[in-house]
Image: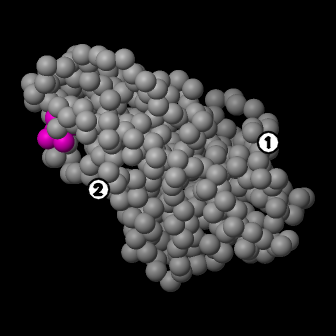
Amino acid sequence: MKILAISHEFPPIGGGGANACFFLTKGFVEKGHEVTLVTANYQGMPESEIVNGVRVIRVNSKRAHKEHCSFKEMLSYLLKAYPVANKLQKRENFDVCLVFFGIPSGPIGYMLKKKYKLPYVIRFGGGDVPGFQERFTKVYKVIAPAIKLIWKNADALIANSQGLKDMALDFYNKKPFDVIPNGVDTEVFYPIVKEESDEFKILFVSRLIERKGLQFIIPQLKKIQDSTEKSVKLIVVGDGPYRETLERIAEENHVSDMVEFVGQKGKEEIVPFYQNADLFILPSAKEGMPNVVLEAMACGLPIIMTPCEGSKELIDGNGDIVSVEGFEKRIIELIRNEEKREACSKVSIVRCQELFSWQQVVDAYEKKLNGMCRRK
C-alpha cells in the first residue's frame, strides 16, 4: 500500500498521539508499505527527511510549544498542510489516507476523498472528540456540523479505547467505531533488577495540564510520608502550562522537598525514570488510552490510575483504578505491601507482552486499511 498519513504531531512534538503516529507509520514500513507523513514543523526542524523509512514532510505552521497546541495553531497547520497533501496525492496517487486526528487533520482526509476519491480512516486520540477538552467546548459547538460531516464520510473510525468510543458515540452514533488500542515498544521499555533502597519513588509522566489531576495528589504526600519509614519522592516528568501552579501547590502544602520536577524528556532519556521507579500514578480526568501507562507497565511498574478512558483495558491484576480521593490509601497500601507490588509488576509485564505489542496494533490497522485500499 501507498499510505498518506496526516498528523499535526509527530515526535519530538506532541504526546501520546504523536507516539502512536511514530510507531504505526514505522510498523507499516517494516511490513513493506510506502508511507508519507505530513506533519508540523517546530523550531527549524528539517522540512523533509526519512525517519524509520517514513518520508516525513513538515509544514511551517505556527507551532509554538513542543508539548501542547492551541486551536489557532491547529488551524494554521490545517491551512498549511492541505495544499501539501493535495499536491502529494495529485502526484503520487496514494491508496489510503490515515488521519491523526479528527481535529485538526480530519478536513484534509475529507477534501482529498471528495476530490480524488481517496479513502480515509480517522484514528481518534481523545482531544479530537467533542466533550473531551473543556478548553475547546465553545469551538466544538460551532464546528459540530462539520465534524459530523467528516466522520460520516470517513471509511473507518478508530478509537484507542472502549471509553473513548463510548464518548464519541455520545456525539455521533450513525457510524460504527472500531477499537484498536495503543501499543508499547518492549524493546525500549523493559524492567531492570533494582537495588534495595530506603527511598520509594512514585512516578508521574505527562504534559502538565490541569486535566491530568496531579494537583489532587500533591497535597496527599505528607500523609503518605507519615505512614512509612521510607523516604517518599514524587518524580514528575513532563512540562506544560500548569507546572508553575503545581510547584506552588507543593510549596503551599510543605512538600516541595518531596516533589522533583525534571521537565520534558526524550524517549531515550525517559526510560531510566520508569525502570528506577516503584509505582506509577495517573490521576487523569480524561484519556484516550494513555501511552505513559503502557510504558510504565512494560517496565514492570504497578499502576494506580483513575477510571478514565483506557483504564479498564489496562488494569487487571496489575494495580488499582480509584478516584483521586482514593490514591492516598492505595499508595500507602502498596508501599507497605512489597509482595503485592511484585505481583502487580509481573502482571504488568505479561499484559504488555500478550496484549499491547505494537506489532499486534500495526497488524490490526493494516487489516483495516487493506479492506478499503484502492489497489487490493
Location of the N terminus by quadrant is bottom right
- Mark 1, Cα crowd under 10 Å, few <14 / some 14-19 / many 20+, is some
In which image quadrant can residue 248 be found? top left
In the image, taking residue 238 as reference, residue 337 lies left or right, namely left
Q: Is residue 282 visible?
A: no
In the image, taking residue 7 as reference, residue 116 lies left or right, namely right
What residue does disc 2 label? 307
For the point 57% across and 49% down, the residue is 357
In the rendered structure, which amino acid carries the disc numbered 2? Pro
State the image coordinates of residue 306 (x, y, percent, origin top left).
28, 51
What residue does disc 1 label? 53
Q: Which of 263 and 90 is in front in this view?
A: 263
Toward the right, the furthest residue is: 91
Instruction: Tell whether position 329 is magenta.
Output: yes
Q: Tag 2's secondary structure?
A: loop
Colour convention of the picture = one colour
Q: Which of 55 and 276 is in front in this view?
A: 276
Q: Is residue 338 visible?
A: yes
Q: What stretch is highlighted in magenta?
A: 328-332
For the point 20% across and 46% down, the residue is 324
In the rendered structure, which amino acid carries the disc numbered 1? Gly
For the point 51% across and 55% down, the residue is 355
